[in-house]
Image (cartoon, rainbow, N blue to C red):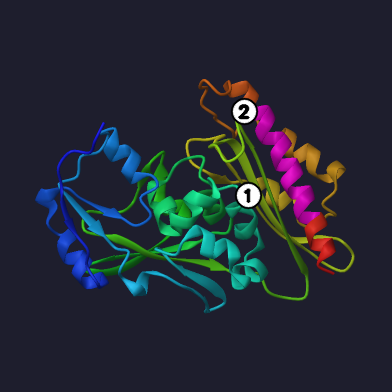
Amino acid sequence: MKAAAFDFVQPSSIDEACRHLARTSDDPQIIAGGQSLMPMMAMRLVRPGLIVDINKIEALSGIAEQDGGVTIGACTRQADAEASPIIRTQLPLLTKALRFVGHDQTRNRGTIGGSLAHADPSAEICLTAIALDAKLTLTSAKGQRNLTAADFILGPMTTAIEDGEILTAVSLPVWTGDDRVGAGFQEVSSRESDFAIVAAAAQVSIDADGICRRAAIAVANATPTPIRLTALEDGLVGHKPTAAAIDPHVDNLDTLLEPEADLHASGTARIHIAKTLIRRAILEAAEDAKAND
């Protein structure tokens, strides 16, 4: 199939893009990488009257250390983020997650903001944003507002973006201090680079005695949206992140996980996979932290 007819504009500034998006009668859609939008348009699952191409807006691309974190422009290509030394050293979890996102070809076009705005429940970037409590900046003709990733992602393919708004940047905190930081990312998919059946992300900091002092753990596709496992994090802090310490807390996750059954896996299978991947992600993060001694 081919996309339905649409108008096309390519603004050179955020303000200009916001003015076009204010034309709500045209049902405008933003395009950056197009890795999700174009297939949906081709199948006529969406029929925008206006496409606003934001690729020429320089202010929407780039990676910078800022205010104790790293700010990534929404139009930054996933491949550029994956190769960034800033992200590799300051946000190790994101670097690991990006390796699972699609293929080399799609990461060359796909954007960080595009994945977040699409809000696929299996998306690795969304999972990482939830795990690290990212802050997202939304811009419109009325001004800016900031939301946490947990408040931004409302459900499968559903976000808090309002009419006329653009996701312009995402900021992720950098863990600082004397403790060693490590990250782990685990995923199961039908084929390499396919959508995740379940994915788990973990970032931990451990002190010189091997005790966990901070933890961020999240899982995707085991609930309608990616979620932080705060009870598991709290149970891990103050202990060495060993299998013996992790297992009792992971075994108690059954009532929290609410996976949907589909052609890839039953709900029961997804719970088993999720618990296995969560264990592996935590242990990987712990080993990664030790390696950073």
Q: Residue at x 60, y 33 (%)?
A: 191
Residue 159 in view (yes/no): yes
Q: Residues within 10 Å of mark 2 (few under 14, many from 20)?
A: many
257 in magenta: no
Q: Residue at x 55, y 73 (%)?
A: 69
Cα distance between the residues tagged 1 and 2: 20 Å
Say if 104 sits above or below 225 in the image. Answer: below
Q: Residue 38, how many percent across, how many down?
A: 32, 44
Q: What's under tag 1, amino acid-wise? A: Thr
SS class, disc 1: helix
Q: Report the quarter where the N terminus lies.
A: top left
Q: Residue 106, how many percent across, how many down?
A: 47, 49
189 with respect to 60 (left or right): right
Q: Residue 212, how many percent across, how many down?
A: 79, 59
150 with respect to 17 (left or right): right
Say if 205 sits above or below 279 in the image. Answer: below
Check disc 1 and report the residue beneath it: 230
Residue 292 or residue 214, whichever sits in front:
292
Q: Quadrant of residue 186?
A: top right
Q: Residue furthest left?
A: 25
Specify the segment rendered in magenta: 271-286
Q: Earlier in the sequence, mark 1 or mark 2?
A: 1
Q: Report the quarter where the C terminus lies.
A: bottom right
SS class, disc 2: helix
Secondary structure mainly formed by the magenta segment:
helix
Q: Residue 195, how many percent across, how many down?
A: 53, 37
Closer to the camera: disc 1 or disc 2? 2
Q: Quadrant of residue 17?
A: bottom left
Check disc 2 and report the residue beneath it: 270
Q: What's under tag 2, amino acid-wise? A: Arg
